[in-house]
Image: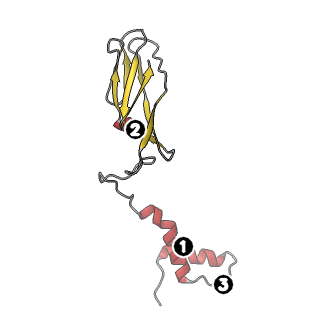
Amino acid sequence: MTTLPPAFAALRRHLEGAGNSRAIPRRALLLAAAFFFLPFIAPAAPTAAGAPAAIGSARPAEVITEIFIDPPKITVDSPGGQFRVLVTGKTAAGWLIDLTHAAEFRSQDAALFQVSARGELQSLRDGRGTLEVRAAGQTTRAVV
């Protein structure tokens, strides 16, 4: 008879000492331990690029049908003020996916504000302008 690893042996003693007079089969202990520890030791499934899949990331077969800018209307209080926008895509199945990292941002009024590749706006002067965002083959605009 082989001996159990210390963690399993401790679990068996604990369960048997809790008023359970029947001996717990070794196979049941190993299965319970495997289901408990598996999420902690299994690696994340790699994506096509080789990086772990992010929560909320789209699978290659999913098509983005619409994109949104959050917030849809941006108010920057003063010249020099900064603001960051998020871009969300909606799939045909209804899932919402963060597309901020893949979006292209463009200020349609460069004299009013600048926008970085990460979606960070910086106001240059007072006024009203438009931010254009492209992602996943879709284009949308927000009032700044």
Mark yes or no: residue 9 visible. Answer: no
Residue 124 lies, with reference to residue 73, above or below; the image says above
Expressed as whole percent of the image width and height from the top left, the position of residue 34 reads 49, 71
Query: What residue occupies the far bottom of the structure in this picture?
Result: 1
- Residue drawn at point x = 41 percent, y = 16 percent: 81
Q: Nearer the viewer, mark 1 or mark 3?
A: 1
Q: Nearer the viewer, mark 3 or mark 2?
A: 2
Q: Nearer the viewer, residue 102 or 84?
A: 102
Determine the image quadrant of residue 138. top left
Q: Which residue is mark 2?
A: 99
The span from disc 3 to disc 2 (Cα, nearest Å) is: 55 Å
The span from disc 1 to disc 3 (Cα, nearest Å) is: 17 Å
Q: Which residue is mark 3?
A: 22
Horizontal side of residue 33 vs 133, given as left or right? right
Horizontal side of residue 13 vs 86, given as left or right? right
Label 3 amino acid?
Arg
